[in-house]
Image (tube, rainbow, N blue to C red):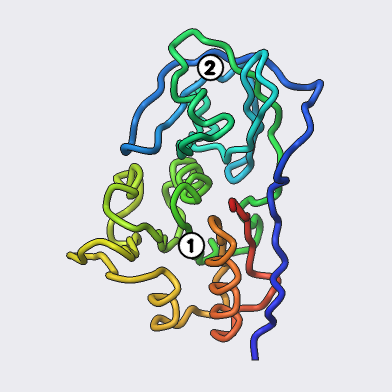
């Protein structure tokens, strides 16, 4: 019987403004779907580890939100992947930004980072829904030699954000509302996970909506993956 209570490293829902926030400038706003975009900012010397997140706000705007870093530490810019929420307090504002506009960045924060050490490179399983793919995009671009499999739960192919960054043999899009096809699982991420046992030595990273995370945690525990090898970051 699996343990129903995973150890979740959740992002704070409404972080307080930080005196450490620093100004960055918008470089580009790149659409990746009708409802999502990549916001590229000047780096301004900000250091981070793959998997960490930052708070972003706009001057004279009281709202700020947390976003996993999408770009690599080797890049000379800083990127986040944003899902625009109709009527949302911040994402529509970010989408309307133009090159040269100022934003405020606080961070980095979080410990949703890769396990280090050991004699052999670990085997990794990345499970994401929607924009929860962000930290894995950062991890894979930072370390192309990772031994990983990525499961990305999406509704349709429009949500397969920048999948070209991932090795196609290591990537399984799990499409709940779209047609299947070569390499595509026509169903939910957790349905695929139930049918494909995971080796107990695998380090498993879960990022996205809480329903997926709780369900995937239980499935992984049933497969024999120990609690200490499951890491989670809740987006919503």
* In front of the other: 13 or 106: 13
**Vertical order, 130 against 36 (above or below):** below
- Residue at image coords 58%, 43%: 50
- Residue under label 2, please give it: 42
* In front of the other: 91 or 10: 91
* In front of the other: 74 or 187: 187
- Residue at image coords 69%, 54%: 10
- Residue at image coords 51%, 64%: 124
Residue 13 picture quarter: top right
* In front of the other: 215 or 121: 215
Residue 57 picture quarter: top right
Relative horizontal placement of residue 173, taking residue 26 as reference (left or right)? left
> How many marks overall?
2
Residue 37 picture quarter: top left
Residue furthest front as drawn: 87
Label 2 element class: strand
Q: Residue 167 in the image: state x and y as whole percent.
A: 32, 53
Residue furthest right as drawn: 19
Q: Residues within 10 Å of mark 2 (few under 14, many from 20)?
A: some
- Residue under label 1, please give it: 127
Relative horizontal placement of residue 118, taking residue 142 as reference (left or right)? right
Q: Residue 80 in the image: state x and y as whole percent.
A: 51, 33
**Vertical order, 191 against 8 (above or below):** below
Q: Residue 42 in the image: state x and y as whole percent.
A: 53, 17
Q: Residue 214 in the image: state x and y as whole percent.
A: 60, 70
Specify the quadrant that holds the N terminus: bottom right
3D distance between C-alphas at marks 1 and 2:
29 Å
Dot 1 or dot 2, earlier in sequence: 2
Residue furthest top as drawn: 100
């Amino acid at each position: 019987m699996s343990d129903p209570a995973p150890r979740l490293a959740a992002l704070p829902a409404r972080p307080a403004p930080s005196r450490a926030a620093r100004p960055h400038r918008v470089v580009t706003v790149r659409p990746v779907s009708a409802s999502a975009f990549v916001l590229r900012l000047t780096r301004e010397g900000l250091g981070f580890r793959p998997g960490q997140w930052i708070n972003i706000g706009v001057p004279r705007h009281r709202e700020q939100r947390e976003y996993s870093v999408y770009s690599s530490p080797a890049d000379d810019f800083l990127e986040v992947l944003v899902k625009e929420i109709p009527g949302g307090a911040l994402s529509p504002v970010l989408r309307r930004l133009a090159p040269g506009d100022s934003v405020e960045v606080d961070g980095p924060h979080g410990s949703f980072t890769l396990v280090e050490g050991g004699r052999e490179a670990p085997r990794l399983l990345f499970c994401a829904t929607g924009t929860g793919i962000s930290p894995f995009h950062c991890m894979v671009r930072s370390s192309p030699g990772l031994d990983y499999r990525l499961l990305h739960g999406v509704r349709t192919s429009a949500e397969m954000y920048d999948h070209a960054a991932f090795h196609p043999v290591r990537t399984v899009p799990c499409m709940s509302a779209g047609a299947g096809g070569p390499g595509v699982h026509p169903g939910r991420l957790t349905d695929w996970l139930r049918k494909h046992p995971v080796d107990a030595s695998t380090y498993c990273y879960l990022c996205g909506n809480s329903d997926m995370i709780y369900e995937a945690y239980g499935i992984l525990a049933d497969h024999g993956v120990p609690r200490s090898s499951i890491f989670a970051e809740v987006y919503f």
